[in-house]
Amino acid sequence: MNPIANIDEIVENFGYLDEWDDRYRYLIELGRGLAPLDQSAYCEANKVVGCASQVWLDTRVEPREHGEPVLTFRADSDAHIVRGLLALILALYSGHTPAQILSTDAQTLFQDLGLTAHLTRQRTNGVRAMVERIQSEARRAAAEARVA
C-alpha cells in the first residue's frame, strides 16, 4: 500500500474519468490507500477544526542539515469521500518544505479537477480547514527552523 499517491498521477487519472460517479469512486479508492494512523494520533491535538466529518492530521517535521525542514503528513477521517480528499491534499503537500507548501495553491488544483463545483459547501469548508492546518504547520516549522 502506497502511503501517499503521486499528485501528477492523480491528476492524470482524473483526466481519464468523464463521469462524476467514477471520479467519486476514484476519490474513495485513493482514501482507502492512506496508511493507517497510529492509535496515538487520534487525539484532540491532531483533530482538524472546521470539518463536519472527523479528521485527524499527524505532522512530522524532518530537519535538514543545510536547508529548510521537510514536512510529512498522515491523515484519517471517518468519511470515505473525505479520506479521498485527504489523500489528494497529502499528495499535494506531504514531503515538501514549508516554502513549497506555502506557495502551493490547493484551490487551483481543486478547480482544475472540477472538484470545487461538485463538493458541498460543508466539504469545501472542510478542505479549506485541512489546507489551512497544513499551512499553519508549515509556518510553524519555518519559524522554528529560523530560530534553531
Image (tube, rainbow, N blue to C red):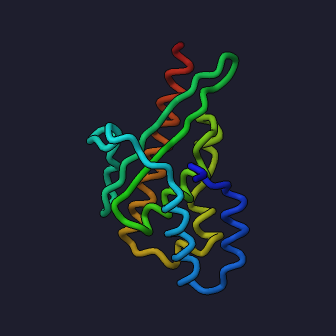
Answer with left or right where residue 59 lies relative to residue 71.
left
| Relative vertical location of residue 129 with respect to residue 123 in this rendering, above or below | above
**Residue shown at 36%/65% (left/top)?**
79
Residue in the picture at 38% in, 40% down = 38
- Please determine whether, in this image, residue 73 is positioned above or below residue 92: above
Which residue is most to the bottom? 19
Which of the 4 image quadrants contains residue 71? Answer: top right
Measured as percent of width and height from the top left, residue 59 is found at: 46, 37
Q: Which residue corresponds to the image point at 32% horizontal and 46% vertical from the top-left?
A: 47
Asked if residue 91 lies left or right of residue 140, the reply is right
Q: Position of residue 19 (x, y in %)?
A: 60, 86
Q: Nearer the viewer, residue 12 or 2?
A: 2
Residue, far front: 1
Q: Outermost residue toward the top? A: 148
Position above or below: 130 against 72 = below
Q: Residue at x 53, y 13 (%)?
A: 148
Q: Nearer the viewer, residue 141 or 89?
A: 89
User: In the figure, residue 39 lies in which quadrant?
Assistant: top left
